[in-house]
Image: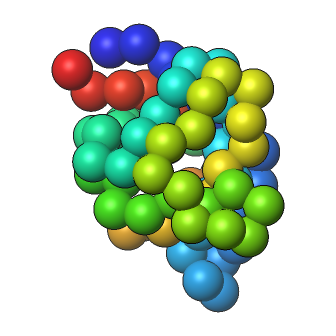
Amino acid sequence: MKQVGQVSHYYDKIGVAIIDLSAPLKVGDKIKFEGHGADFEQAVDSMEAEHEAVQKAKKGDTVGVKVGQKVKEGMAVYLVE
């Protein structure tokens, strides 16, 4: 697995994780959240950058991804091959 980013913020009410990307990410990719006692995988169903839906994002971008479970700031995000 390759690390693609880190959670910088989590919006509890809407279930969205803000991820600072260290590698490209696209809709349809399968990602894994790891750390702080949580460990789960999910597909990227939708992604937003600067309040606009995007299909892909590049290294250095900050994106919002809807998540199925709670995440915490600092959790590592990996791309599941």
Q: Quadrant of the C terminus?
A: top left
User: Residue 36 occupies which quadrant of the picture?
Assistant: top right
User: Residue 50 occupies which quadrant of the picture?
Assistant: bottom right
Here the colouring is rainbow
In-front residue for pair 81/69: 81
In the picture, measured across the screen, residue 13 lies left or right of residue 42, that is: right
Instruction: Count how many numbered circles sit on residues in the image.
Output: 0
Q: Quadrant of the N terminus?
A: top left
Farthest-out residue, left: 81
In the depicted structure, whether residue 51 falls above or below residue 19 = below
Residue at left 58%, top 38%? Answer: 57
Tell me, yes or no, if residue 61 can be seen here. yes
Q: Position of residue 52 (x, y in %)?
A: 67, 68
In-front residue for pair 27/39: 27
In the depicted structure, whether residue 59 falls above or below residue 29 = above
Q: Position of residue 61 (x, y in %)?
A: 73, 36
Residue at left 27%, top 27%? Answer: 80
Q: Position of residue 77 (x, y in %)?
A: 51, 32
In the picture, measured across the screen, residue 32 lies left or right of residue 34, that is: left
